[in-house]
Image (spheres, rainbow, N blue to C red):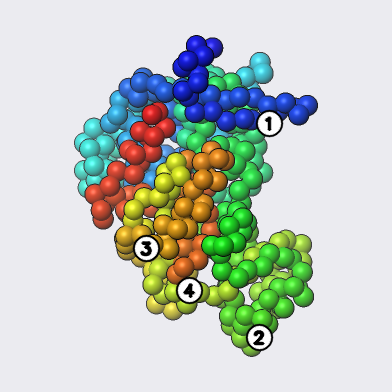
Amino acid sequence: MRNQACAAQCPWHLRPCHNNRYLIVLYFSVDISMTKIAFLMDPIETVAIKKDSTLAMIRAAQVRGMEPYYCRQEDLVITETRVCAYLRPLSLVEHFAKALDPASVNNGDDPWFTLGSAELMPLSHMDIVMMRKDPPFDMEYIYTTYLLERAETEGVRVVNRPGSLRDCNEKLFATAFPQCCPPLVVSRRMDVLKAFHAEHKNVVFKKLDGMGGASIFRVMESDPNLSVVLETLTNSGREQIMGQVYLPEIVDGDKRILIVNGEPVPYALARIPSAGETRGNLAAGGRGEGRPLSDRDRWIAQQVGPELVKRGLNFVGIDVIGDYLTEINVTCPTCIRELDAQFGLDIAGDLMDSLVS
C-alpha cells in the first residue's frame, strides 16, 4: 500500500462487498508513458477503420507512449482465484496511427495493426482495462462484467465500471432523470401500453435491449398495426418495452453528446434520418452533422454528469432529441471520429489524459 499522504490525494470509491462491508478502491496517478492499457473489444480485424471510436482510443494511448494490449471476451480466465487474460501487445502501424486516415492503408487492404504473441497474465498487471465490446447485452456480456468486477478488486481500473454497465440499461437509465425526459412508459401489459398510445396518439415503441435503431416503431393515431407491434415487441407480453411520445424534432437530428468524466464535449453529432425514416441512427442510414451544444443540451449534461461520475461511467454518450433526453449509452459509445474530424478535437486523447491525471 502506498503512503497515506499519497492515498489521501487519490480518487476513490466504495465498492459494496459481502456481509455489509465495503472495499475502498483507490486510483493512483501514474506516469502516462508507463501505463499499460488493455482493450477488451470485438475482433480488431472486423472494426470499421473509417469511423471506429475504439481505434481512436488505441491511437490516443499509443501516441502518448502508453502500452496497449488486446483481448476478447473468450480470452478471460479465472485461474487460481485470479482473473487473467490472454493478452497480446497491440500497435497501429505508424503511418496509420498519425491521423487514422484509411487511405494511408489502402482502406484497410494493407496491414494497419500488429499483434504480439498472446500471454496469459493477471489483468491486475494492467493499469486500465477499456471495456469496448459492442452489444448485444446478453448473458455472455454480463458474465464478462462479473469477471472484470473481480479484476477491479485486484487493482485494475475498468472503464466503464463493470457493475454500472450491468445496472444502467441504456433506455431505462434515462428514466432516472425525469426532468430531462419526454412523456414515456415502460411496461409489458397491453392495456397500459395501449392507454399510453391512446393518450398521446403518436408514439415510438422500442425494445429495452435494442441497438443501432433496431426494433423501433412509430405508431400514429388509428394505426391498425398497434396490436401486432406491441405483441411483437413484448414477445406476447413476456418482455418489458418502452414507449415514448414521438418527438417531431427528430427531423433535425438525434443528437449524440459525448460525456468524458462527467463533462460534455462542446459539440454534438446530430444524426439526421434519411428520407422517409424516423430513426437517425447512423447504422439505420442516418447522416451525421456536428453542431455546438445548445443551452438545453448543456443543462441536460449537467443533470446527468454527476451521477455518471458517481457510478464510474467515464465515457458515455447521451442521446437528445429536441429538448429531451432519450437514452444514455454506456456500453460502447461511438461518434468520436466524426466529431474529431469536423471540429479538430481529440476526444479520445482527452479521455486518456483524464484517466491517468
| Tag of residue 278 | 4
> Which mark lies nearer to you, 1 or 4?
1
Residue at 64% across, 65% down: 242
The residue identified by callout 1 is 16
- Tell me where residue 55 appears, x and y as whole percent: 36, 41
The residue identified by callout 3 is 294
Disc 1 versus disc 4: distance between alpha carbons?
Answer: 42 Å
- Disc 2 crowd, CA 10 A, few/some/many (<14, 14-19, 20+): few
Q: Earlier in the sequence, mark 2 or mark 4?
A: 2
> Which mark lies nearer to you, 2 or 4?
4
The amino acid pointed to by label 4 is: Thr
Disc 3 versus disc 4: distance between alpha carbons?
Answer: 22 Å
Q: Earlier in the sequence, mark 2 or mark 1?
A: 1
Residue at 46% across, 45% down: 262
Is label 2 in a helix, a strand or a loop? loop
Q: Earlier in the sequence, mark 3 or mark 4?
A: 4
The amino acid pointed to by label 1 is: Pro
Q: Earlier in the sequence, mark 1 or mark 4?
A: 1
- Disc 1 crowd, CA 10 A, few/some/many (<14, 14-19, 20+): few
The residue identified by callout 2 is 224
Marks 1 and 4 in Cβ contact (< 8 Å): no
| Tag of residue 96 | none
